[in-house]
Image (spheres, rainbow, N blue to C red):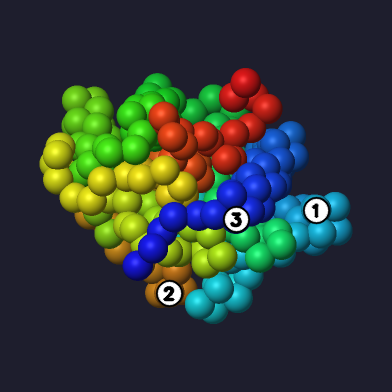
Amino acid sequence: MNNIKSQSDIKKMRVAGKLASEVIDMIGSHVKSGISTEELNEICHNYIIEVQQAVPAPLNYKGFPRSICTSVNHQVCHGIPSKDKILKNGDIINIDITVIKDGFHGDTSKMFLIGKPSVLANRLCRVAKECMYKAIEIVEPGLHIGDIGAVIQEHAHKNNFSVVREYCGHGIGKNFHESPQILHYGVKNTGIKLEEGMIFTIEPMINAGKKGIKVLNDGWTVVTQDKSLSAQWEHTILVTNNGYEILTKRTEEG
Ligand code: MF3
Ligand code: CO
Ligand code: CO
């Protein structure tokens, strides 16, 4: 299986990644106490369709019923936007955006903090972000894929947090989820070696308590088994000749 993108694929992936990042930038000012996750979904859906002339990838993907994923507090990922889920002071929420433009996917997510979350919630969101960046920063041709998981796991455990094992980062391109799988735990110097032209996501899910998860009866929403808080950040990354390029970088990230 060949995961190496052509120059023309890479150009299109830059466009798709930029659009996904712009949806996150756009929705930020709406993510406040009192709004429902269904309203956030509608705003993003309309923006992607009308302004970006793009396609929200989650909608109808394997039966997912909305255009974005919204995962609040102890929800780990794949939360389904709902009019009954109203954000309140102290909540933390992951918003995960995937758009398709010109046949190619861009996939990114971040945590938003509503009002004044607890010290623990703040620390969890910060450490989850650090886990993602520590992994991104070592990406270069020749790196063993196990090194990515190892740095994430090491940083999470150092902070007494755990790493969700059931879901992982993924190759991405014409398809939402392609090979290779990017595990968020692992052993240094193991696994395949990265090559220039690969594109994949890094999207660690970090729990404040134990690593166990379960899927709710809606068939989608993943929650922590022990009801502890969970946080996730995601970027789509291109392996360049001497390092990496973040295809979903936001304006705030410089
Ligand atoms: N965006 C998620 C990811 O990072 C996948 C969501 S699949 C959905 O891979 F169906 F729930 F949208
Ligand atoms: Co992803
Ligand atoms: Co995603």
Name the mark nearer the viewer: 1 or 3.
Answer: 3
Q: Which label number is shown at residue 219?
A: 2
Question: What residue is shown at x 46% (from left), y 73% (from top)?
Answer: 218
For disc 1, the marked residue is 52
Residue 170 place in picture, x, y as percent: 40, 56
**In the image as oriented, which residue stretches furthest toward the bottom?**
63
**Residue sitting nearer the eye, 48 or 105:** 105
Name the mark nearer the viewer: 1 or 2.
Answer: 1
Q: Secondary structure under badge 2?
A: loop
Q: Above or below — where is 41 with respect to 134?
A: below
- How crowded pointer 1 is (Cα within 10 Å; few <14, some 14-19, many 20+) is rated as some
Q: Above or below — where is 26 with respect to 212?
A: above
Name the mark nearer the viewer: 3 or 2.
Answer: 3
Question: What residue is shown at x 45% (from left), y 64% (from top)?
Answer: 177
For disc 3, the marked residue is 9
User: Which of the 4 image quarters holds residue 133?
Assistant: top left
Q: In 3D space, how far apart are the residues under numbered discs 1 and 2 (Cα atoms)?
A: 30 Å
Picture quarter with the C terminus: top right
